[in-house]
Image: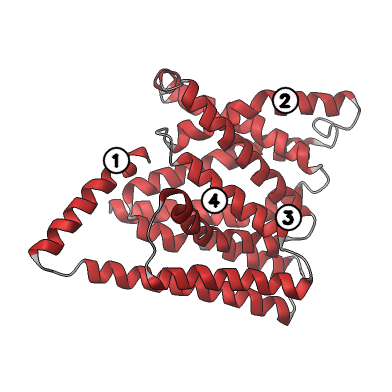
């Protein structure tokens, strides 16, 4: 029952993230920097309310120190870049390319793990990472330029995850601190835009104002759902479900908003999808093999590996 509930939380979070392009399209009349500013401001206020209502404000404050603030300054900058590029790209007609970024993100995260944490990849994992690289190279060759939107989204979110691995704050505390760091600059920018007569809040109708304010809960709620899911279901299931979001984004871009998707782009995307398939199947086979009874030496080494993983999982 607990696992089923966790799976539904995860599905809810990923479906929400997958349908976000529809929401940002409703705000296409608002410049992307202003959308970002309102998302930060209202997210921070919403998350502060959650901490206050759940009586977690004091424990949150006690966790803050110079090192945590320094790490989360970097994380806040990265997530701010990610959000800005994503909102701009959606409203500029590049939803399909944003989906490519989130398709290749898991494989890029694996590559970053090798570079920065000296993690070892199995041969088929290397093959998957290589295939993804071939797909990006092919798309670059076909269009004559790098798919920079996809690469910025994938790299900013990948490095963001890398930075977050060095901290001990959970998802709720982490996002509260990130939006808190960006809160004053975002509020100052919105005030500046309004003073110049370019601000859209309170000047573009009640529906527009409601959408801008609701960007806060829309950011916080899926995060809380995901955090709840991560405590209830295996990471392997989360790894499979994470592709719901970019798949929905891709379908929205092609089928709903009519973005161009010629055969040449289909070939490049297919190579990336093949890489993801290889990666997923390899992981499934490896976990199945690792779960079989083996020699005492193998059981001992797996027990040691399990113990070494526990602290990382607690960092959550």
Q: Is residue 273 above or below residue 105?
A: below
Cα gap from disc 3 to disc 1, whole angstroms: 38 Å
Cα gap from disc 3 to disc 2, whole angstroms: 23 Å
Residue named by callout 1: 311
**Which mark sits nearer the N-terminus, 1 or 4?**
4
Residue named by callout 3: 90
Q: How many other residues sit within 10 Å of disc 4, few (<14), some (14-19) or many (≥20)?
A: many
Occupied quadrant, residue 257: bottom right
Res. 193 in view:
yes
Task: Tell me where residue 278 appears, x and y as whole percent.
Answer: 45, 74
Cα gap from disc 4 to disc 2, whole angstroms: 27 Å
Quarter in which the C terminus is drawn: top left
Point out which mark residue 187 bears.
2
**Which mark sits nearer the N-terminus, 1 or 2?**
2
Task: Tell me where residue 235 appears, x and y as whole percent.
Answer: 36, 55
**Which mark sits nearer the N-terminus, 3 or 2?**
3
């Amino acid at each position: 029952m607990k696992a089923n509930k966790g799976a539904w939380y995860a599905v809810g979070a990923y479906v929400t993230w997958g349908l976000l392009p529809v929401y940002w399209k409703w705000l296409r009349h608002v410049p992307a920097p202003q959308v970002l500013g309102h998302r930060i401001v209202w997210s921070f206020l919403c998350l502060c309310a959650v901490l206050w209502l759940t009586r977690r404000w004091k424990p949150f404050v006690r966790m803050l120190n110079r090192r945590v603030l320094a790490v989360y300054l970097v994380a806040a900058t990265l997530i701010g870049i990610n959000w800005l590029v994503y909102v701009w790209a959606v409203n500029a007609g590049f939803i399909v390319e944003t989906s490519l970024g989130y398709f290749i993100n898991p494989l890029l995260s694996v590559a970053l793990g090798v570079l920065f944490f000296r993690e070892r990849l199995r041969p088929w994992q290397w093959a998957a990472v290589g295939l993804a690289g071939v797909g990006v190279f092919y798309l670059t060759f076909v269009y004559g330029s790098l798919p920079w939107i996809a690469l910025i989204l994938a790299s900013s979110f990948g490095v963001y995850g890398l930075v977050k691995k060095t901290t001990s704050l959970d998802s709720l505390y982490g996002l509260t601190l990130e939006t808190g760091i960006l809160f004053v600059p975002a509020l100052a920018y919105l005030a500046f835009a309004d003073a110049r007569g370019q601000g859209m809040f309170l000047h573009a109708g009640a529906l527009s104002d409601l959408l801008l304010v609701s960007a806060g809960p829309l950011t916080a709620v899926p995060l809380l759902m995901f955090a709840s899911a991560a405590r209830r279901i295996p990471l392997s299931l989360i790894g499979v479900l994470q592709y719901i979001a970019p798949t929905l984004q891709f379908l929205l871009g092609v089928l709903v908003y009519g973005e161009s998707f010629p055969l040449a782009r289909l070939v490049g995307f297919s190579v990336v999808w093949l890489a993801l398939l290889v990666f997923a199947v390899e992981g499934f086979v490896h976990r199945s093999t690792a779960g079989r009874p083996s020699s005492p030496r193998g059981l001992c080494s797996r027990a040691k590996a399990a113990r070494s993983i526990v602290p990382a999982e607690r960092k959550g």
